[in-house]
Amino acid sequence: MDFQTKPLTPHFGVDVTGIALEEVTSENGFAQIRALFEEHSALLFRAQEISDAKHLELAQLFGPIEDRQADERKPGEAFEIPKVSNVLEDGTTSAEMDLKTLNLKSNFLWHSDSTFLPVPSLVNILIGRVVTTDGGATELASTRAAWAMMPETLKAKVRGRGIWHRYSHSRRKISPELAELPMFNKWPDTHWNAVWENPVNGREALYIASHAFKIDGYDEAESQVLLDELTAFCTQPAFVYSHTWSVGDVLLWDQRAVMHRGTPWPYEQPRTLSSICSSVTEADGLDRIRVPT
Ligand code: OGA
Ligand code: MN
């Protein structure tokens, strides 16, 4: 495939043109996309006409499809493309203080997806399906670029330590009622190394998220202060790309090296992004974050 790239920021991310994702297969174009992903951490493909089926196929090329509802689905029920959306079944939008909206607001906290799962996610492939006229940008922050430029004094506070993650922890910051829902309490706490080395190019990234609640060697209050300091460092404007959505935009990023967040919009406006995460496998360096027991 003959494609062009343009940097999204000086430190990470590329805008890719000349690729129709609908035509990408394992033999046609995917190897190049995967190489860009390892190198640049975030890829944007604008104005794509991409079906749900192709979205799923593309995610499968990255790794096993993450299915957080597997235990809730009845036998024979098909996997549905997860939607990040405020649109209700009757077509209206969820009110600002509804649990559905509060869950979307939890996404406004900087995070990497699924650090709380027994196997975390490698990539999130987001597609703009219904977009707003104001707000609703998705922002990405490179924890690889940030780690490379972080003062040694701050790095030394977390290097070599494990960090504990829990889904309900990020929800509790927004609403205690939300945090109690069964869907946020299905998995035991996870424990991952603070730094994730990319197995292809050896570059390190800080691996933190809004779901992180304890760093080994610190109590929970100290941990939160340190996690907030690390997050603030990583999300300085120099390390951030802010994406304003148009319908058909496809934005994907390396969850091992990038945090992301949503930003507010007028909640009476519908907003729907299709989102498929693929899980990491051993080939993606899962062993690098396993904390020795
Ligand atoms: C996500 C997410 C933020 C947004 O899809 O995992 O956090 O902009 N989305 O909606
Ligand atoms: Mn997310």
Image (tube, rainbow, N blue to C red):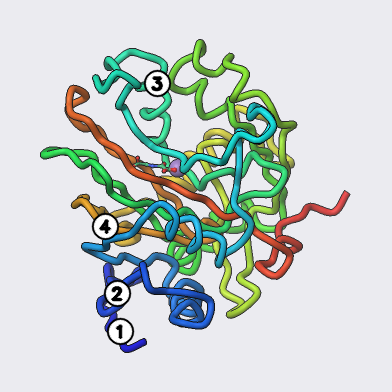
Q: Position of residue 75 (x, y in %)?
A: 69, 32
Label 4 neighbour load within 10 Å: few <14, some 14-19, many 20+? many
Q: Earlier in the sequence, mark 2 or mark 4?
A: 2
Give the labeled residue for mark 2.
Answer: 16
Question: Which is more toward the observer, 173 or 16?
Answer: 16
Question: What amino acid is found at the position of numbered circle 4 in the picture?
Answer: Asp
Disc 1 residue type (three-letter): Phe
In this view, 196 is above or below 172: below
* Residue bearing mark 4: 249
Q: Secondary structure at mark 1?
A: loop
Q: What whole-number distance in Å separates the C-alpha atoms at marks 2 and 3?
A: 33 Å
Residue occupied by mark 1: 3
Q: Which structural element holds mark 3?
A: helix
Q: Residue furthest bottom?
A: 2
Q: Is residue 161 visible?
A: yes
Answer with left or right where residue 83 lies relative to residue 263. right
Q: How many marks?
A: 4
Is the residue 189 above or below the residue 90 in the image? below
Question: Ligand 2 sits in which quadrant?
Answer: top left
Say which amino acid is labelled 2: Val
Report whether 113 appears left or right of 136. Answer: right
Q: Residue furthest front?
A: 76
Residue drawn at (42%, 25%), measured in percent from left and top? 103
Q: Are marks 1 and 2 in contact (CB under 8 Å)?
A: yes
Which badge, 1 or 2, is on the more N-terminal residue?
1
Q: Position of residue 73 (x, y in %)?
A: 63, 30
Q: Can you tell me whether the CB of the residue at mark 2 lies under 8 Å from the nearest atom of ligand 1?
A: no
Q: Which of the two labelled residues, at mark 4 and mark 1, occupies the earlier sequence position? A: 1
Dot placed on the residue nearer the N-terminal end, 3 or 1 = 1
- Up-down relation of residue 167 to residue 155 (above or below): above
Q: Are marks 3 and 1 in contact (CB under 8 Å)?
A: no
